Amino acid sequence: MHKVAQAPPEAQDKRLLIAKIIVVALYLVGAIGLSIPEYRVFFQDLTPAQLLVTLGLILFFHRGWTDLFPIFGALAFWIGFGSELIGIHTGYLYGDYVYGPTLGPKLWEVPLVIGVNWFILVYLTGSVFSRSITNDYYAAFMGAAAMTAFDYVMEPVATALDMWYWKFDIIPFENYLGWFGVSFLIHLLYRKIIFEKFNPLATFLLISMILFFAVLNFTLDI
């Protein structure tokens, strides 16, 4: 097991404050930019960078750098990415959809940052219940439910911003069932694989992401 030396509490508090300012700027400026038609395309192109900055902040404040944490990260990435491959090429799990250009470079017609997105969302929603729920299966259920609710808020914005497109422009109920099922599996791995689950930035970051998509549901005239 690898341990990372901790900075003094004062330094940690200062870093956390700076990180929260970065998060607010990242998602507030993004929401404003995407809401203005003249600048929308420019900010759409920055979407993969926004996800990668979010990932960087999560990893910077992550405290459980055991040998098993990278294994969980890889599993979350590839299970999420693999489920999207199945969805894109078969229509199973989520329904009939294709990815647009907004999420950047693709592998087998699926954007690479989608795997990053699955890791981010499982990590953040899992962190919310990491200390309040002791039963792994109940925690996985609640985490999957939170992710499905997040997807419900995100879906209209994602289609409006050319992240992906649904057949007949209808988001099928199957999509939410698939999200819940895949999320539950990854959340269960999150609980079963042993590493420190607490991240002091996680809840703030998750709330910021929810507000980001909630605001865009109104400003994009969806």
Image: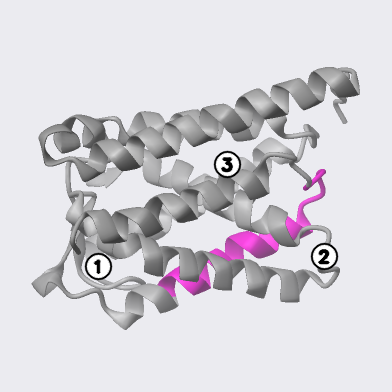
Q: CA distance from mark 3 to mark 2?
A: 26 Å
Q: Nearer the viewer, mark 2 or mark 1?
A: 2
Q: Which secondary structure lies at badge 1? A: helix
Residue name at image x 44 percent, y 32 percent: 26
Q: Which secondary structure lies at badge 2? A: loop
Which of 164/42 is in front?
A: 42
Q: Which secondary structure lies at badge 3? A: helix
Q: Is residue 90 visible?
A: yes
Residue 174 vertical position relative to residue 62 in the rendered view, above or below: below
Q: Look at mark 3 in the image and give the residue it sits on.
A: 74
Residue name at image x 66 percent, y 50 percent: 203
Tag 1: Cα neighbours inside 10 Å, few (<14), some, or many (≥20)? few
* Label disc, if present, on residue 132 of the rendered structure: 2
Q: CA distance from mark 2 to mark 1?
A: 38 Å
Q: Nearer the viewer, mark 3 or mark 2?
A: 2
Count the numbered circles shown.
3
The region drawn magenta spans 178-197
Q: Look at mark 1 in the image and give the residue it sits on.
A: 90
Q: CA distance from mark 3 to mark 1?
A: 24 Å
User: What is the quadrant of the C terminus in the image?
Assistant: bottom left
Residue 146 vertical position relative to residue 76 in the rendered view, above or below: below
To which quarter of the image does residue 91 belong? bottom left
Left/right of residue 102 with respect to residue 131 in the rendered view: left
